[in-house]
Image (tube, rainbow, N blue to C red):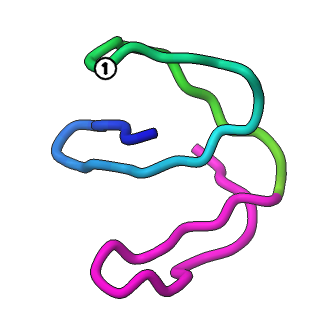
Amino acid sequence: MKIRVGNFLLTAVVFGGVVYKIGQKVRLSFSGENIMLFSRENGRMIANGEVKL
């Protein structure tokens, strides 16, 4: 899934049986301590841990 957040485009992997329409606006929340962020430029992992907002 590709998600636009402001000027940023995020690519996410969502486990489960949810189907979204292209262009559909959705609310997202992150929970858990197993969040991984990867670089768009080279695919390398940037961070691994939890997200606190």
Amino acid residing under circle 1: Ile
Using the image as rendered, state which of residue 16 and residue 36 is in the foreground. 16
User: Which residue is drawn at the image coordinates 49% and 73% (left, top)?
Assistant: 38
Q: Position of residue 23 (x, y in %)?
A: 26, 18
Q: Is residue 26 left or right of residue 30?
A: left
In the displayed structure, 15 sits above or below 19; it is below
Residue closer to the observer: 50 or 36: 36
Quarter placement of the C terminus: top right
Q: Position of residue 41 (x, y in %)?
A: 28, 81
- Quadrant of res 37: bottom right
Is residue 25 shown above or below 32?
A: above
Q: Quadrant of residue 25?
A: top left
Task: Give, as a single range, the part of the protein colored magenta.
Answer: 34-53
Residue 32, horizontal then vertical, whole percent: 83, 47
45 vs 33, left or right, is left
Are there few (<14), some (14-19), or many (20+) residues within 10 Å of tag 1? few
- Image point (65%, 18%), residue name: 18
Q: Can residue 38 be found in the magenta stretch?
A: yes
Callout count: 1
Vertical side of 22 occupied by 31: above or below:
below
Vertical placement of residue 52 versus 14, above or below = below
* Outermost left residue: 7
Is 40 magenta? The answer is: yes
Q: Which residue is mark 1?
A: 22
Please name the residue shown 60% across and 47% down the image: 13
Q: Secondary structure at mark 1?
A: loop
**Image check: 12 left or right of 18?**
left
Q: Name which residue lies at 35% across and 87% down.
A: 42
Q: Depth check: give the residue in front, 25 or 13.
A: 13
In the rendered image, residue 2, in percent from the top left (x then y), is placed at 37, 41
